Amino acid sequence: MQIMIDRKTIAIGLLTLFLGLGCSNQGEGFPRDQVVIRVDNQVLTLAEFNEYFEPISLSSDSEDDQDNNEVREARISFLLQLVEEMIIIRRAEELHLSILPEELDEAVRDIQKDYSQGGFEDMFLKQAISFEVWKERLRKRLLVEKVMRKELLKEDSVTIEEMRGHYNRHREEWSRGQEIRARQILLPTDDQAKKVLKSLQNGETFSTLARRYSIAPEAQFDGDMGYVVRGQLPICLEEPLFDLEPGDVSPVIKTPYGFHIFQVIEKRETPVPNIDESIERIKQEILKGRLEAAYGPWLAELRSRYHIKVNTEMI
């Protein structure tokens, strides 16, 4: 069984990014003051960083000092996440791992079928990014996931005893009251979030604005987060989200991740699941727990192995 890296629950910053990173595998050839990140022979230049960040910054035209500070904080946060990704891609080189063309094509088809006719192409226009650049970033994201599965899930078998214990610990929270299907728009600054909320109040659709402006991974799916139950989200998000009724839009909610706007699509009562119905979910949750627990020490060991240089002053 191959575990999927869950975009909503895994505590890895790099997976909250747009769709990966375009970086150069060149140790030389750029002026020293133009290199923002160096991981051994991989470098990320200021031009590449700005190209990456541009789809996010396009939605803000404010020159207010406070807003500029928020944008800089967002840029620093992205930069540190990119460092993690480059470290893992460096590990892929050591392991001689790559993404085959057929693997990449299959991933593109899987994403494409979630769009309406013409919607897939519109996404590139709205995000000011070419298909080829997007596809390369997707390849790098898939490569990161492949490395993580190989390194952190060396043992992917789950025993009956583990499954039974996990089920007994979690079945009540799975069936606790309601579950909600919601959409999210995540913005890096308060100013941008207020502008988007005003657009919603003026009649623009949530799904359109999510595709155009949200920096969350589910933006490509109209901001649809799928179904969530209590306990899956941080309290600062869970409480205001579960207070909404279907069709309602939340005010701007500030968290350490950015500025959120939610829309509830549906609410429903969750039945008590039996263990036979939950086997696949139980396996996935156990494996994800193993992965999350192992990620921090693993990344720290890689950091100590490679020569890493980050120039935060440039951004």
Image: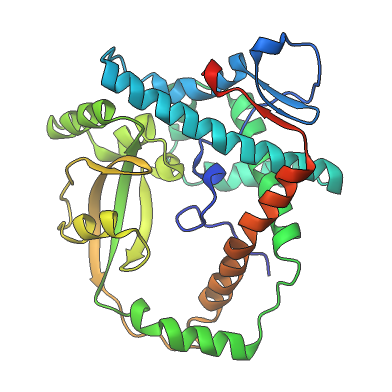
Q: Position of residue 213 (x, y in %)?
A: 36, 30
Q: Which residue is painted at 58% across and 61% down in the image?
A: 292
Q: Position of residue 242 (x, y in %)?
A: 21, 61
Determine whether 155 is above or below 37 in the image: below
State the scheme by which the image is colored.
rainbow
Q: Position of residue 34 (x, y in %)?
A: 65, 12
Quadrant that contains the N terminus: bottom right
Left or right: 267 as drawn, with respect to 149:
left
Q: Which residue is painted at 24% across and 30% down in the image?
A: 196
Determine whether 146 is above or below 227 in the image: above
Left or right: 165 as drawn, with respect to 221:
right
* Numbered marks: total: 0
User: Does residue 269 show up?
Assistant: yes
Name the quadrant containing residue 94.
top right
Left or right: 121 as drawn, with respect to 135:
left
Determine whether 63 is above or below 37 in the image: above
Determine whether 65 is above or below 236 in the image: above
Name the quadrant containing residue 309.
top right
User: Does residue 20 show up?
Assistant: no
Q: Which residue is painted at 35% across and 84% down in the image?
A: 172
Q: Position of residue 229 (x, y in %)?
A: 32, 68
